[in-house]
Amino acid sequence: MSLKDKRREVRISAADDDVLAEAAGLAGVSVSEFLLDRALADAHALVEAHRTISLAEDNYRAFLKVLDAPVRPPKALVEQARRARPLKRGE
């Protein structure tokens, strides 16, 4: 078990507190445990959803095709690189 050295506080209505206390009692845990377990589960799910990309099969194949295609830089970028002055060491 990790060291619990941080504290968070939240202000809630009496009605919300009653519901949380009842739910925690039904789950057989303290209100703090109930809140932390639920909050962490939701937090992990949200973070994972934002870290993960899901594509339909046809979109996945199109994505891989683009990744595997040879790189063709835009003509304007190639022209700009040709016009750029050479860098000297120390600049």
Image: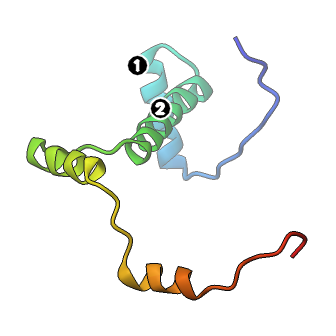
Q: Residue at x 43, y 38 (%)?
A: 48
Q: Quadrant of the N terminus?
A: top right
Q: Is residue 79 above or below residue 48?
A: below
Q: Residue at x 44, y 43 (%)?
A: 51
Front residue of 22/75: it is: 75
Residue 46: % across, % down: 43, 43
Few, some or many C-alpha atoms within 10 Å of disc 2 (few <14, some 14-19, many ≥20)?
Answer: few
Front residue of 65/71: it is: 71
Q: Which residue extends farthest left?
A: 58
Q: Is residue 32 left or right of residue 7?
A: left
Residue 10: % across, % down: 65, 49
Q: Residue at x 41, y 37 (%)?
A: 45
Front residue of 80/64: it is: 80
Q: Determine the secondary structure under disc 1.
A: helix
Q: Residue at x 57, y 88 (%)?
A: 83
Residue 38 numbered tag: 2
Q: Is residue 57 above or below residue 72?
A: above
Q: Label 2 amino acid?
A: Arg
Q: Nearer the viewer, mark 2 or mark 1?
A: 2
Q: How many marks?
A: 2
Residue underneath mark 1 = 26
Residue 35 numbered tag: none
Few, some or many C-alpha atoms within 10 Å of disc 1 (few <14, some 14-19, many ≥20)?
Answer: few
Residue 50: % across, % down: 42, 48
Q: Quadrant of the C terminus?
A: bottom right
